[in-house]
Image (cartoon, coloured by chain):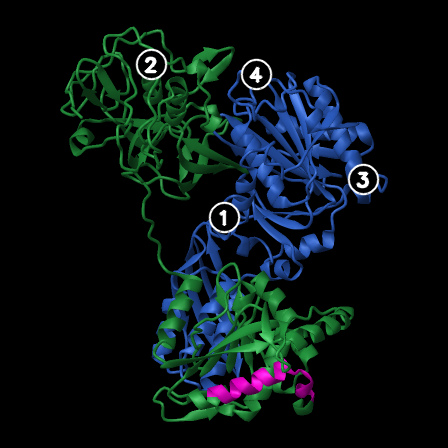
Chain colours: A green, B blue
Amino acid sequence: VCIHRVRSCSSIRFIKSKYVCVFDKSALKFSHQQRLFRTSAVSCGQIVQFKLSDIGEGITEVTVKEWYVKEGDSVSQFDSICEVQSDKASVTITSRYDGIIRKLHYSIDDIAFVGKPLVDIEIDASKGVASEEDVVETPPMSHEEHTHQEIKGHKTLATPAVRRLAMENNIKLSEVVGTGKDNRILKEDILNYLAKQTGAILPPSPKAEIVPPQRRAEAVPAAPKDKARKIPVPVSRPIAFAGKDKTEPVTGFQKAMVKTMSAALKIPHFGYSDEIDLTQLVQLREELKAVAEMRGVKLSFMPFFIKAASLGLLQYPILNASLDENCQNVTYKASHNIGVAMDTEQGLIVPNVKNVQVCSVFDIAVELNRLQSLGSAGQLGTSDLTGGTFTLSNIGTIGGTYAKPVILPPEVAIGALGKIQVLPRFNSKGEVVKAQIMNVSWSADHRIIDGATMARFSNLWKSYLENPASMLLDLK
Amino acid sequence: MVLQSLKNCLWLPCVLRTPKACLWSTASGGLIIQSVSNDVYQNLAVEDWIHDHMDLEKQQVLFLWRNSPAVVIGRHQNPWQECNLKLLRQKNIKLARRRSGGGTVYHDLGNINLTFFTTRKKYERMENLKLVVKALKALRPQLDVHVTDRYDILLDRKYKISGTAAKLGRTSAYHHCTLLCNADKFVLSSVLKSSFKGLKSNATPSVPALVKNLFEEDPSLTSEMLLDAIAKEYAVQHQIDHHITLINPADETLLPGISDKTKELQTWEWVYGKTPKFSISTCLNMVYKDSVLDVKVNMDVKHGRIEVCNIDLPEQWLPPGLYSELVKSLTGSKFCPNETTTLVTTLLRLCPQDDELHSRWSLLCENMIRLM
């Protein structure tokens, strides 16, 4: 790529820099539309005072309500600059020029006056002045070209840069479909038009475009100009991806997660997993679902899992405990406030069902319904989200079998439930039968919980669920 | 009144690279369209779409729409200042921020919305409102309605039945106004009353007014009749057929890009985040163990997020470490009850398991959240 320093044609009002390549005899022009602001260009730019234009209805002053740009930003023609308000009318002021914002004449809530300067914009380069930077020689342009071509009574809107591109490639703007705002013709539209014409795949534009392997260009219509205007066919281009990284601060829900998880991982976790045969429970739920619906409640599997967990905690209360900061004391919590991990639009929240030890399965279902609807509406209260002593996470509703859940302090145990799958299993007679299998993965605080305790709790919980009738015996 | 589906509408296969914009072109001076949706976000999105994509040079557009219960605030307003957010959430009334200026309104199906689309040059609110008054008088000559210089329409010289707002862009503009036919005045007044004390802001304040429904003046009037009368008058003045074309704001083929516009109008960043900077200076009266604590709270909120937060608690009421954690967490987070609840409940997990501490913390946080 060679850069030629040439003098600009004085009839051009706005000049953009370009790279011109010369290969062999034919000149391949590589049109690279860019707004190149080098420091040398900056000082040579012409500052234009952009005045606030007439709003109509005889209005002389408005209040500036919002700036969309700040000093130093570059703007294109038609970009929004600010929002002003006057007497119930909100007006979007757009830029008339391409350039850099050099000064904002008003602050938010100031009164701005029609006809007075609103912003100072520095335009790329001054007209006709030979500047140090790269300016490209332009072919003699038809001076009849107006800013807006009138075609069939409709205006063609295109920025000077786009018009130039069209001109160099011998394209009539009237033949190009504009996809920009107000049907403005954008650079992409010109390139697409060209691609269709020549069958060539064009080099990637500044916007991210992944270029597929090139095809041979057909005979390019020879333009009757000195330098042939050919679109360069990429020979072997590496796939160029012009995406940009985006950095944003961690706030809100994410901040909460960061805090919780950082504290959680200070707890030495151990895991224990098992497989539960829910065939009988599935059948039971089917029968009870209708009864619950008549009472206006949606009955899922969770109320059963939660109640079974509570029954298990009665036998192994250390899983419903809390260890103090210095690991000096263990507090056995009397209430079984079982948390249910919920996925909302904003992220993970864990409301809990209070006092499961005195709730029936139906009570739990009612409470879950309430928490779920509040959760999805983003209206859970602090009492719903605090006081949990043990947590279950039903990740299986989304998918997965085994998991490694993270304990939520100040609790000491958590269980993650995988999805229910229909799998072949052997029954007591040695026959292969269809079974509804779900996996559970427990994590516990190894400082006060040992593997055996966890295993025994899990076995008890499992037995209640595999044989729901046994829950009846121990229900309080 | 002839209602016509858009599919049957004349379609000019013009060379215009605006197939979307000329879809409704009937090569005449005007077009009347009505939304089939009652969703405030979808309808506001249609306004945006027409404003951004339609060429209004050759034809002007009248858009008729109604919404299920919603509160709509102006572009530069403060929802905390303008309405009772708690009540809105309770009653499941939507909150929307429109792109035009002006004040806050309550919409329900008893209120009709009219949007007059023109080019920027032809923007003329008085003319539009006079058209509405003319239509009303043609329908019911005995109605005492007139336009004020604040662009309101008053009934019996006293009651406001219509409010106005406008949006001007580079080449196009729109003026929309409401018309109270049979809205629920009770909900309207309770929802548009904010109990927020100590809010200081430069956001556009609404000017409260006495309102009345046209239905109360003449029970034979319905929203449909009013819509029709206005459409008829518009047709006459623009010398077009009295056709109302129905449009579905969910139709992406007809209105490419409309679902993105609809989504944007529902984002927190638009509805709350566009609130001009404001500050809160208030006192929480917390009842704690037979005594009342007066806790001064000062906050600066910018883009809907807490920039600065000061809570004046009695010394050692909360352990200093926890207090600074609270302030640090709140800073930069949304001035939003949901987000704050999540943050404070999370912080509670990480502090010592002390019942006394927990109850103080909950008390303070609940009071703080109530502000939002």
* Image quadrant in which you'd find residue B346: bottom left
Q: Residue at x 47, y 16 (%)?
A: A155
Where residue A45 sits in the image (x, y, percent)? 22, 27
Horizontally, residue B143 falls left or right of residue A171, namely right
Residue corresponding to mark 1: B270
* Frontmost residue, A226 versus A253: A226
Secondary structure of the magenta portion, mostly? helix
Q: CA distance from mark 2 to mark 4?
A: 31 Å
Q: Nearer the viewer, mark 2 or mark 4?
A: 2
Q: Nearer the viewer, mark 1 or mark 2?
A: 2
* Frontmost residue, A202 versus A94: A202
Disc 1 residue type (three-letter): Trp
Where A362 falls versus A88 (above or below)?
below
Q: Residues within 10 Å of mark 4 (few under 14, many from 20)?
A: few
Residue corresponding to mark 2: A219
Disc 2 residue type (three-letter): Ala
Where residue B260 sits in the image (x, y, percent)? 52, 41
Q: Nearer the viewer, mark 1 or mark 3?
A: 1
Where residue A204 sits in the image (x, y, percent)? 32, 32
Q: Residues within 10 Å of mark 3 (few under 14, many from 20)?
A: some
Q: Nearer the viewer, mark 3 or mark 2?
A: 2
